[in-house]
Image: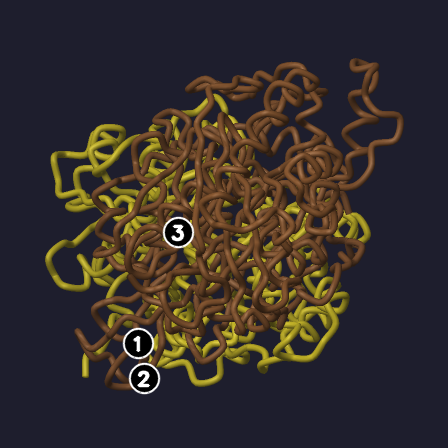
Chain colours: A yellow, B brown
């Protein structure tokens, strides 16, 4: 059995732009902003980067296909650069490419950068896009909120609770994200919001109201990775941060097309997290993880993810949320940076933004949000729809 | 030659009914001649229905009546409102009705008598055949036609065994009498004075044609037990019956007040009602009228009692939801341009080669059933979806169009583009196995729940105005309640867009 990548690759530099409606910035401007921060943080010359992986989801809304825009915007030294796309896991996929590139021994220093320029569509929400020549013929013209909203009706049905109870727990998730986001100078949405306002917001896709939905943002995030041996010479004050595991699980059509899934959970999150725990050597995630950054595209997604990650028991996630288990001062702080909800969700950058928060926290650089010496954190992305999706899980920690 | 006749039938009237008073009160300011108290309802298509979708629904009802034994070799589609001028509408209906590529098909239009013409052609032809007529006529706001017209379809199965009614004879005339017309490409009828239409048209053309038919059949007008008078209003129907010597009691219950005048489908729709009221051995005279007359004489058989459980006009008329939103009706018909936002700018170009490749899936709603593990699945794929099977190339065709299903999960999506928001969709479970996600239609906000029963219907998926194309797919709808009107529950708190 493969031994995995635990502690084989270190993160030596990270950068992240302010997320939000960056009307004055192109995707290229955002890339440079994130890259310059990472480069300075790593304290290396750009010519030491030997390969790059570029995460961009909507090429038609931004800099186009391929990784040429990355290579050109950053004036990379004609190195290998590859664009990756895997829905909302795109940013994490860029990191996975760079990490595997270093872990394989092919490169000493590699770059992962994700970007998304979503606010040039002229309308709210994610861009309208084709679902392909076949599904456009018959599949509903779903939106992201409409797809994820169905977690709610299934969850209520599966666990015999009232929608009002679930809505209250969902409101707590969003309330918590706004509390966290308010403390983060790089977050898109920085206002605290009370639960009444959340519960009485206009409906977007039943039962998701406006505040159950994440921000649609522009932004970029970046990581420079290398071998632990090289990292030792580069890392200044603070602990070295290494990758403990990176796992990916994709639906194969069984959730949507075979009657073995009740719709109340994400099968891929359960599979990917178990693999990631094994690779990272985690036996009790609730006890061992000091913080988590999960894919709260919608409040209900975060709630069911707590169960899918094995942190809450099935059917108990809503109670744990209401009990404050995942609040900033709770047992397992979740989305301390504001999450997708308030930090924002430029798709290609999101996975790397999550790692950025872990990196800051692990190195003691998270300012007002800083936890007391965390050692291990997890990121989670869920792209697509609950019935057909891509899930990535990364575990990052100090070494 | 073997005796031919009607073996089954089915009707389809959209569930949505617009009270005529909703029209009258909205347009009375502009139309002083509008009746003081407009009565009754007209059936109106939803935003995703047209003549083709209604025809498919009626055809499925007619095939249901054959208990799965039907295998028609041809399909005739009659309509004056065919969505396509050159792409055979009947061929699409045949494909959506489960007829194979070997079935012959023909579109018959150009006159309000086209429905009866199509029926005659099938009766005079050979082999088992389906005839379906549907119309969805547009009318200018404030016009008398807007009050009068309604949208509906009716289908008949024609064959040679187990007849409900025998074909006795037919008689047709052609008179270029332009009491109304609609030019190619025009949206609306141009309608002349009613008095002229009656005195010079109806009063001459119909009695003359009826006389011709009776002579051919060798029977007297008084032998006619049932006279189905095209789409004539009750006053004209009575005067025509009287002019022909047919008893007033022979005229069936009128349905214009409940559903409107369904154009070339109207005589066939009315015939479904008549056959369900008829006794054995009775003569039924069917009239189609428009630039001449088209008459068919039937005689019911001893099996006519078998017509009672079929889904005819009565069942369809009894199941309705009142929708008094006149502006929505105009929007559904493209008569007012709502602001649907930038999401409506989405390019709905159809990749025709992909569509043709997937036509059985998309139009026929045919999925697969794995011969290794017996799992029904939609869509049909090369590798079985069952995680414990995964066999390749083992799936046989599994039709899903006539299956019932229930809701696994759902949402009411106010963000997604819909021309009747919210867009409702969800994961569904078919009775007998199989799951998928489909768009729902005809549900009101707050009406869907996990476990709600569903039926399948062929509907418009998208319109591509840039290329003049429209594509269709199967959607999940609430099953029609054939026992009486359905009550739409009020929207639950928190289910509306503005909470």
Which residue shows up at 27% across the image and 44% down it? A54
Q: Are marks 2 and 1 in contact (CB under 8 Å)?
A: yes
* Residue A343 visible in this rendered orientation of the protein: no
Badge 1 crowding class, 10 Å Cα cut-off, few under 14, some 14 to 19, many 20 or more, is many
Image position of B495 (left or right of B331): right
Instruction: Name the spot of residue B230 as percent of width and height, x first.
Output: 59, 39
The residue at which mark 3 appears reads as A138
Instruction: Name the spot of residue A266 as percent of width and height, x first.
Output: 47, 70
Q: Chain of mark 3?
A: A
**Which quadrant would residue B63 be assigned to in this image?**
bottom left
Give residue B135's mark: none
**Above/below status of B2 relative to B414:** below
The residue at which mark 1 appears reads as B369
Q: Chain of mark 2?
A: B
The residue at which mark 2 appears reads as B374
Q: How many marks?
A: 3
Which residue shows up at 46% across the image and 19% down it? B176
**Above/below status of A5 relative to A316:** above
């Amino acid at each position: 059995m493969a031994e995995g990548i635990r502690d084989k690759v270190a993160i030596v530099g990270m950068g992240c732009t302010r997320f939000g409606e960056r009307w004055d910035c192109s995707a290229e401007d955002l890339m440079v902003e994130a890259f310059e921060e990472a480069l300075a943080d790593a304290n290396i010359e750009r010519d030491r980067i030997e390969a790059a992986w570029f995460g961009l989801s909507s090429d038609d809304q931004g800099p186009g296909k391929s990784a040429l825009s990355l290579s050109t915007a950053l004036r990379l030294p004609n190195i290998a650069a590859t664009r990756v796309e895997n829905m909302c896991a795109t940013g994490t996929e860029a990191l996975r490419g760079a990490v595997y590139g270093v872990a394989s021994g092919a490169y000493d220093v590699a770059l992962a950068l994700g970007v998304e320029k979503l606010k040039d569509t002229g309308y709210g929400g994610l861009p309208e896009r084709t679902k392909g020549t076949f599904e456009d013929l018959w599949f509903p013209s779903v939106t992201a909120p409409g797809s994820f909203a169905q977690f709610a009706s299934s969850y209520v049905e599966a666990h015999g609770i009232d929608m009002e109870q679930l809505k209250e727990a969902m409101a707590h998730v969003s309330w918590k994200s706004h509390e966290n986001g308010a403390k983060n100078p790089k977050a898109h949405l920085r206002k605290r919001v009370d639960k009444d306002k959340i519960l009485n917001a206009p409906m977007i896709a039943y039962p998701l109201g406006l505040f159950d939905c994440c921000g649609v943002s522009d932004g970029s995030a970046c990581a420079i990775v290398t071998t632990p041996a090289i990292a030792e010479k580069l890392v200044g004050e603070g602990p070295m941060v290494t990758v403990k595991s990176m796992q990916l699980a994709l639906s194969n059509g069984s959730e949507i097309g075979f009657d073995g899934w009740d719709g109340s959970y994400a099968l891929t999150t359960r599979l990917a997290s178990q693999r990631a725990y094994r690779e990272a050597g985690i036996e009790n995630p609730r006890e061992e993880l000091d913080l988590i950054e999960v894919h709260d595209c919608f409040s209900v997604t975060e709630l069911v993810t707590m169960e899918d990650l094995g942190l809450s028991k099935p059917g108990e996630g809503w109670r744990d949320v209401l009990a404050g288990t995942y609040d900033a001062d709770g047992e397992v702080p979740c989305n301390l940076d504001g999450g997708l909800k308030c930090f924002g969700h430029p798709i290609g950058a999101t996975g790397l933004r999550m790692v950025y928060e872990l990196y800051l926290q692990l190195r003691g650089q998270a300012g007002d949000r800083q936890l007391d010496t965390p050692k291990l954190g997890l990121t989670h992305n869920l792209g697509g729809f609950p019935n057909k999706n891509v899930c990535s899980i990364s575990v990052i920690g100090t070494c | 030659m073997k005796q031919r006749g009607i073996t089954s039938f089915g009707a389809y009237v959209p569930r949505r009914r617009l009270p005529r008073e909703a029209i009258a009160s909205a347009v009375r300011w502009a139309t002083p001649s509008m009746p003081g108290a407009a009565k009754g309802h007209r059936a109106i298509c939803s935003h995703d229905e047209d003549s083709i979708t209604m025809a498919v629904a009626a055809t499925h009802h007619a095939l249901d009546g054959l208990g799965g034994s039907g295998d028609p070799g041809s399909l005739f589609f009659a309509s004056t409102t065919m969505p396509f001028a050159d792409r055979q509408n009947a061929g699409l209906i045949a494909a959506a009705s489960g007829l194979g590529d070997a079935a012959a098909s023909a579109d018959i239009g150009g006159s309000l008598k086209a429905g009866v013409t199509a029926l005659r052609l099938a009766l005079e032809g050979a082999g088992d055949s389906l005839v379906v007529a549907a119309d969805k006529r547009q009318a200018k706001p404030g016009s008398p036609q807007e009050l009068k017209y309604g949208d509906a379809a009716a289908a008949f199965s024609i064959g040679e065994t187990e007849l409900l009614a025998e074909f006795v004879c037919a008689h047709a005339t052609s008179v270029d009498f332009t009491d109304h017309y609609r030019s190619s490409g025009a949206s609306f009828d141009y309608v002349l004075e009613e008095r002229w239409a009656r005195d010079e048209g109806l009063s001459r053309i119909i009695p003359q044609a009826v006389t011709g038919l009776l002579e051919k059949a060798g029977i007297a007008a008084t032998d006619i037990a049932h006279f189905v008078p095209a789409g004539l209003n009750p006053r004209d129907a009575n005067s025509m019956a009287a002019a022909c010597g047919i008893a007033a009691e022979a005229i069936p219950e009128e349905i214009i007040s409940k559903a409107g005048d369904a154009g070339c489908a109207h005589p066939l729709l009315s015939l479904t009602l008549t056959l369900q009221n008829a006794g054995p051995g009775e003569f039924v005279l069917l009239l189609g009228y428009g630039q001449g007359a088209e008459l068919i004489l039937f005689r019911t058989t001893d099996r006519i009692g078998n017509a009672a459980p079929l889904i005819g006009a009565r069942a369809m008329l009894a199941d309705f939801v009142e929708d008094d939103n006149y502006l929505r009706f105009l929007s559904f018909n493209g008569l007012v341009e709502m602001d649907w936002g930038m999401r409506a700018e989405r390019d709905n170009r159809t990749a025709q080669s992909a569509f043709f490749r997937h036509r059985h899936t998309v139009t026929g709603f045919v999925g697969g059933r794995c011969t290794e593990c017996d799992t029904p699945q939609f869509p049909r794929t090369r590798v079985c979806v069952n995680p414990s099977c995964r066999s390749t190339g083992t799936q046989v065709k599994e039709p899903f169009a006539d299956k019932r299903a229930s809701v696994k999960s759902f949402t009411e999506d106010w963000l997604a583009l819909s021309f009747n928001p919210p867009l409702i969709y969800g994961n569904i479970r078919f009775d007998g196995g199989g799951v998928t996600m489909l768009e729902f239609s005809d549900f009101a906000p707050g009406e869907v729940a996990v476990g709600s029963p569903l039926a399948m219907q062929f509907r418009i998926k998208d319109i591509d105005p840039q290329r003049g194309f429209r594509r269709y797919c199967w959607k999940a709808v609430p099953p029609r309640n054939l026992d009486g009107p359905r009550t739409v529950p009020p929207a639950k708190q928190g289910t509306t867009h503005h909470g």
